[in-house]
Amino acid sequence: GGQKVNKTNNKVVLLHEPTQLRVECHETRSLQQNRKIARKRMRQKLDAFLNGNQSIANQKRRIKSSKKAKAKARNKARQ
């Protein structure tokens, strides 16, 4: 953030035309890095849009919550 980022013109806007999904990135001073970050976000957004509950992010969320529930059950059994 700050003045150094504001001085440069390096915002990246990606539009996936078939789905009309849009991603913007203005995190770093480097245009190449912003492109890389924007592409990564676009892949994640497309995955969630096309695959819904089977997307990678949702799978990771389910695994994390099930691990949490198992740990909670183990701790409850110990007491």
Image (cartoon, grey):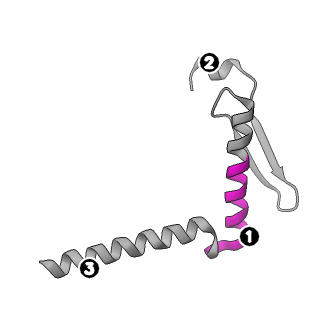
Q: What amino acid is at disc 1?
A: Leu
Local crowd size for mark 1, using a 10 Å CA cut-off: few (<14), some (14–19), many (≥20): few
In depth, the one of 68 and 7 nearer the eye is 68
Q: Earlier in the sequence, mark 1 or mark 3?
A: 1
Q: Mark 2 to mark 1: distance in Å?
A: 37 Å
Of mark 2 and mark 1, the one earlier in the sequence is 2
Q: Which residues are magenta?
A: 39-53
Q: Quadrant of residue 34?
A: top right
Q: Is residue 57 magenta?
A: no
Q: Residues within 10 Å of mark 2 (few under 14, many from 20)?
A: few
Instruction: Calculate the distance from the C-alpha at mark 3 to the C-alpha at mark 2.
Output: 50 Å
Decide whether the magenta segment is chiefly helix, strand or loop. helix
Residue identifier under label 1: 50
Instruction: Identify the residue at the far left of this view.
Output: 79
- Which residue in the structure is indicated by mark 3? 73
Quadrant (top left/top right/bottom left/bottom right) for the C terminus: bottom left
